[in-house]
Image (tube, rainbow, N blue to C red):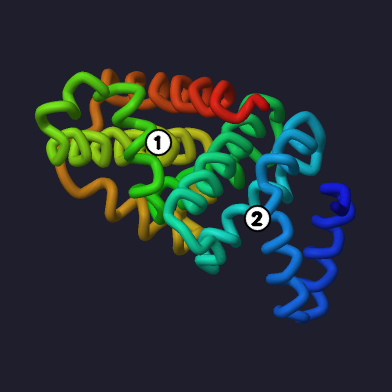
Amino acid sequence: MDSLKDLLDKAHYHKQSGNRRAWVSALCQLMEKRREYYLEGRDNRQLDIYTDGLFKILLLELDDKEEESIETAELAYLGISTLLQQTDTALSEYYKRRILLVHYFTDYFTTAIIDIFLDKYKREHRLQARNLAIEHLEKMQMSDISYLEENNRDFINHDEQLADVSNTIKTGSAFSDEEHQQAILMHRILHAYLKVKYKN
């Protein structure tokens, strides 16, 4: 098995050279050993490129099974949230990546949100629990969007993807300060939950 650094260097080279087949092959290797590579990369600077690779795997739908896609999404979220805790640089880019990850792949996070926050409720109200989980995930996106609006408004204004997500999420009731704080807490709890889940 290639080291994480060697594999990510290989993927970057093939992407830059336009060799899509070799690039996808490298991403598939990352996908097949995603847990092992997470453990290797979680405490070094490769984590940034690792999480970006997982995001590309999801966008390209390289996973064959839903449970594999869920694991890929959870590991990408875990890596991004770890980066947000570890660094003072590139924060806006990491917030963007987390917003898009949760927005595009909401369904892959509903089970974790239900298990953490709605476990008792789901036994009698499974459909309602799923709908509530989606609402929680929307609020979590809104908390990240609010951070960017307060700290780097131009970043959203000049990013078409974020602007589209922001306009979509903002339809509905106003986002209160209390909801904002709750959403920040949900991010922290989800991060801690996934950190335990993938610690070995």
Query: Which circle's residue, 2 or 1, is located before the other in the chain?
Result: 2
Q: Residue at x 74, y 43 (%)?
A: 37
Three-letter amino acid code of the residue under disc 1: Ser
Task: Judge the density around disc 2: few (<14), some (14-19), many (≥20) Cα neighbours within 10 Å.
Answer: many
Spot occupied by residue 51 in the image (x, y as percentages of width and height): 65, 47
Q: Name the residue under label 2.
A: 31
Specify the quadrant of the image occupied by residue 22.
Answer: bottom right
Indicate left or right for 66 with 96 as reference.
left
Using the image, determine if residue 132 lies above or below residue 119: below
Spot occupied by residue 75 in the image (x, y as percentages of width and height): 58, 40
On residue 146, which mark appears?
1
Three-letter amino acid code of the residue under disc 2: Met
Using the image, determine if residue 196 lies above or below residue 84: above
Spot occupied by residue 82 in the image (x, y as percentages of width and height): 63, 30
Indicate left or right for 114 with 23 as reference.
left
User: Does dot 1 land on a helix, a strand or a loop?
Assistant: helix
